Amino acid sequence: MAVVGPNYQFIYNDVGSNGSLSDGGVFQNCSLFEALENGLLPNNGVIVGDDALPLKTYNMKPYPGRNLAYDEKIYNYRLSRARRISENGFGILINQFQVFEKPIACNVTTVVKIVFTACALHNWLTKISISINRRYRIVYMSYLRPRHVTRIAAMRLGCSGRSPAEIVGSNPTGGMDICLL
């Protein structure tokens, strides 16, 4: 169970529940449920959940059924668009860390550590990926040189046949560019 923020960063993780439990059961047994029940969110603050979660004042969930009124269909559509942030956050996490593409052959405590570590690294990588523009994808990282921003990679989208040296270019801080394409 996780809460994903608007920048695809994991705000809350609860890992280690039995896979046979329902999403609603996992939610009611996690620390987030108790915090939400005690007023964790500011006034009018909500989380977007699926229909497995209980209907609460802080949880937006879709209208059930097929024969819905027009306004209910619009609400469900917009709610599903909001839920895409969470789905995309998990997709990015899986794409960044291939360990999640198949079952992890470790004991449960190791798997919990792997998931928490991957989420922390994902949040860090999301935070340092500053700029994506329509013609160029530029990833900046500031950890290589403390008071400078080092350019890691620049790639013109849609261009093929260029070598990594042509794509990366020179680094104004004197460090070495690393192509992460």
Image: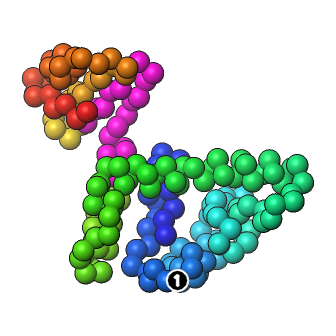
- Asked if residue 172 can be seen in this view, the reply is no
Q: Is residue 34 above or below residue 150?
A: below
- Asked if residue 95 can be seen in this view, the reply is yes
Residue sitting farthest toward the right: 69
51 in the magenta segment: no
Q: Is residue 133 above or below residue 129?
A: above
Report x, y in % for residue 108.
30, 80
Q: Is residue 88 above or below residue 36?
A: above
Q: Quadrant of residue 61?
A: bottom right
Q: Quadrant of residue 167?
A: top left
Report x, y in % for residue 129.
34, 37
The local secondary structure at tag 1 comes to loop
- Crowding around mark 1 (Cα neighbors within 10 Å: few <14, some 14 to 19, many 20+) is few
Q: Mark 1 belongs to which amino acid?
A: Leu
Residue positioned 10% across, 28% down in the render? 176
Report x, y in % for residue 78.
71, 47
- Residue range highlighted in magenta: 122-141
Report x, y in % for residue 21.
52, 83
Residue positioned 68% across, 68% down in the render? 51
For residue 177, side relative to residue 122 (left or right): left
Mark 1, residue position? 21
Q: Quadrant of residue 55?
A: bottom right
Q: Is residue 110 above or below residue 157?
A: below
Residue positioned 25% across, 33% down in the render? 181
